[in-house]
Image (cartoon, rainbow, N blue to C red):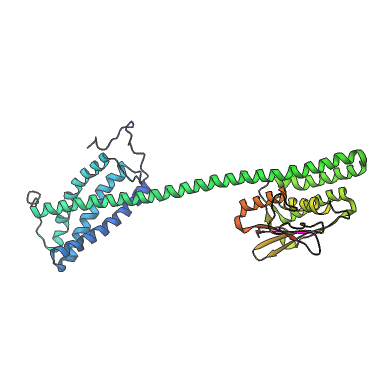
Amino acid sequence: MSSLFPATAAAPDHPPPVDQGAFALRLLRDLRFATVVGVLAAFIITLVVGRPETLYEQVLYSCFISVSGFAIVDTARLLCWPQSGRMRRPRRQWLALAAVGAVAAPLAHFSAVQLVGPLFLHPVPSLAEYPTLPRLSMVLLSFMVLMAGTWLIEFREGLRHARLEQQAALLRAETIERQALQAQLRLLQAQIEPHMLFNTLANLQGLIAIDPDRANAMLDQLIQYLRATLGVSRADSTTLGEEFAAMEAYLGLMGVRMGERLRYRLVLPAELGQARLPPMLLQPLVENAIVHGLEPKIEGGEILIEAAARGVLLEVSVCDSGLGLGVGLDPGPARSGTRGGGVGVATTRERLRVLYGDRAAILLEPAQPHGTLARLTLPLETP
């Protein structure tokens, strides 16, 4: 028997230390299954022999044999191979379990005859009198039931283990996907910041030579803008109040460049100041309104940034009185390469898609009486 149950550390199937708590729980669970098997076997035997009046004693006999036999076989299985979930065990392991079952079946049946028989005034045979053909046939039946039940338990644990492995694989895949999406978001966000800074520095370089005072004022506004944005731009999320403060600093910076040609208003309800959203989400929309709408217009115009709650959604609109979307351009969702739908808006849309899927959107449409309205919709998330 020692060759069937290897105990050396070098053996490939050497079992790890048994968790006693888990061992007890699994054994009790399997014995509950053995009780069900015993009751079912009693009903079948009663139907076969055609004596329904013996059902009660058949239930006691069958349950005793099933539970005691399973206790022996299952204890050997759990102690020698505590790893559950192997859909196909090696043949030698099954041979070892069959050997244990060959011992457990007659032992369980003999014990049932000795202990349950007197309850029904049945004669109790001695060990020498025990081997008769009817009793040996019942021992064989008990052995077959024990091995079939053990196979069912193994199969059930294999299915459960396969489901757990599938769930773990899905969890790993979701974790990898989430990490990839976070990296993608970082890349998309990084595309926004240099775009704005390069434009500002280019304008600053031009002003230094022709208007040092305005260049100095622009530099001061740039410092204020960076102070308002650098702290939150590396975070995963910010508040709507912080985002509006950053846009106010940005518009102040653009105001130095455009002078009286740029007017702006920001409308933020107090109850929405703590709403959460991704950082630097509004800056591409505001920059888009200035670059494509107001700067090309001789007299300039006004920008209105307004936030409102629409049920479970947060709606932030950036409306300008600039040149508008233009004749023949689609007023629907922005596209890269169209007026009002440049790289910044496309990048913002991609960030929203990664973060929220279909729950968020950007819509560009003509403003009244003229200009462009960029409407950003995303889930309302409050502390």
Residue pushed farthest bottom?
Answer: 53
**Residue in the picture at 24% in, 35% down:** 3
Q: Quadrant of residue 79?
A: top left
Using the rendered view, name the quadrant where residue 320 is placed. bottom right
x, y percent for residue 116 = 17, 59
Left or right relative to 188: residue 50: left
Residue 155 pos. (x, y %): 32, 50
Can you name the residue that lies furthest to the front here?
Answer: 328
**Viewer-side residue, 27 vs 313:** 313
User: Which quadrant of the view contains residue 199?
Assistant: top right
Q: Residue furthest top?
A: 10
353 vs 221, left or right, is: left
- Which quadrant of the figure contains the N terminus? top left
Q: Which residues are magenta?
A: 366-377
Query: Residue 111 or 371: which is nearer the viewer?
Result: 371
Q: Using residue 271 as the reference point, say whether residue 124 is left or right of it.
A: left
* Image height of 250 relative to 1, above or below: below
Q: Position of residue 310 (x, y in %)?
A: 68, 65
How many badges with numbers are in the image?
A: 0
